[in-house]
């Protein structure tokens, strides 16, 4: 098994994905994250889905950095005098995490790709974050900009 | 993985500094529909934020937001065009009709720049 910890993060994808595709189709994501932004209550619900490439790397293990690396970079970006990243080495030199299940990968993505105000510290009454099977997300987009997360467990959006 | 270190790259006739080849390479690209990313490079997630607004989160963050990105409609027909806003960890794509209203569409995005 290739030791990806010695490669920059971007090079890991370039090395791994062609090899994975040679073995067969990449996994089709089964789950999506439904979320609403409490800072923009008039906006429709968002639907975040992993790419097949990212999911393949997540479930393989030994490729992606811990999610705390993205938090550290986000903290840098939030500083008023931020111009550009100077701690990119965290992405490449932090030991990669082991394989995740798809469910664990979705929890990782909540903390990586969804604004922290959605998953940390929200104190409102609405459910503004759900991980759901993609199959239950409506395919009719006629009223897409009116989508909200259903507040009953049996409904998705 | 091996590394070739060279100042220039040449086909035997024409030569160009390696920096052009390295800096001119796309650091991220994607092919997407209104509901998912079909395939791509350096794309962790696709977010459907509403009609015609799609956000791509990058696996490898960019150094800064001073990059360039392009997007456009992928399907046949030319009545739609795209605008790509570069963030540091994400790229936001918006697809508009020629009349200026935002619209759902399959699309493609490419981003250049430096990775963190």
Image: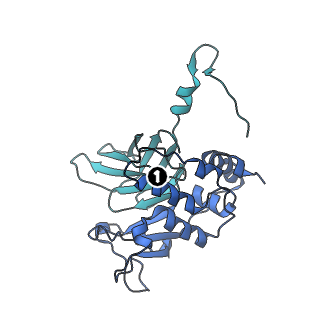
Chain colours: A blue, B cyan
- Between residues A77 and B25, which one lies in front from this camera angle? A77
- Between residues B76 and B83, which one lies in front from this camera angle? B83
Tell which residue pokes out farthest to the right in this image.
A1
Mark yes or no: residue B94 visible: yes
Mark yes or no: residue A30 visible: no
The quarter of the picture where residue B21 lies is: top right
List x then y, in percent, for residue A108: 55, 67
The residue marked by circle 1 belongs to what chain? B
Image vertical order of residue A66 relative to residue A5, above or below = below
List x then y, in percent, for residue A140: 36, 69
Residue occupied by mark 1: B89
List x then y, in percent, for residue B33: 43, 56
Image vertical order of residue B19 relative to residue B63, above or below = above
- Between residues B69 and B87, which one lies in front from this camera angle? B87
Which residue is at a point 35% across and 81% down the rendered structure image?
A: A126
Categorize mark 1 by other alpha carbons within 10 Å: few (<14), some (14-19), many (20+). Answer: many
The quarter of the picture where residue A69 lies is: bottom right
List x then y, in percent, for residue A92: 62, 49
Image vertical order of residue B14 relative to residue B2, above or below = above
Which residue is at a point 60% across and 71% down the rendered structure image?
A: A104
- The answer to whether A3 appears left or right of B16 in the picture is right
Which residue is at a point 43% across and 86% down the rendered structure image?
A: A153
């Amino acid at each position: 098994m290739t030791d990806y910890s010695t490669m920059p993060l971007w090079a890991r994808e370039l090395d791994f994905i062609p090899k994975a595709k040679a073995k067969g189709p990449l996994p089709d994501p089964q789950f999506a994250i439904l979320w609403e932004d409490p800072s923009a209550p008039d906006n429709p619900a968002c639907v975040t889905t992993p790419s097949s490439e990212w999911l393949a790397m997540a479930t393989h293990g030994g490729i992606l950095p811990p999610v705390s690396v993205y938090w550290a970079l986000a903290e840098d970006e939030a500083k008023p005098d931020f111009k550009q990243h100077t701690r990119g080495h965290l992405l490449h030199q932090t030991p990669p995490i082991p394989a995740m299940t798809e469910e664990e990968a979705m929890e990782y993505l909540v903390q990586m790709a969804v604004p922290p105000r959605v998953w940390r510290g929200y104190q409102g009454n609405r459910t503004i974050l759900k991980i759901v099977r993609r199959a239950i997300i409506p395919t009719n987009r006629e009223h897409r900009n009116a989508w909200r997360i259903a507040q009953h467990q049996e409904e998705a959006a | 993985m091996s590394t070739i270190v060279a100042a220039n790259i040449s086909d035997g006739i024409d030569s160009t500094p390696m920096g052009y080849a390295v800096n001119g390479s796309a650091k991220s690209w994607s092919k997407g529909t209104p509901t998912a990313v079909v395939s791509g490079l350096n794309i962790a997630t696709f977010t459907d934020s509403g009609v015609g607004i799609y956000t791509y989160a990058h696996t490898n963050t960019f150094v800064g937001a001073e990059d360039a990105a392009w997007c456009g409609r992928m399907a046949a027909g030319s009545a739609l065009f795209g605008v790509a806003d570069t963030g540091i960890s994400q790229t936001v794509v918006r697809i508009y009709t020629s009349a200026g209203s935002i619209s759902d569409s399959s699309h493609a995005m490419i981003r250049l720049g430096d990775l963190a």
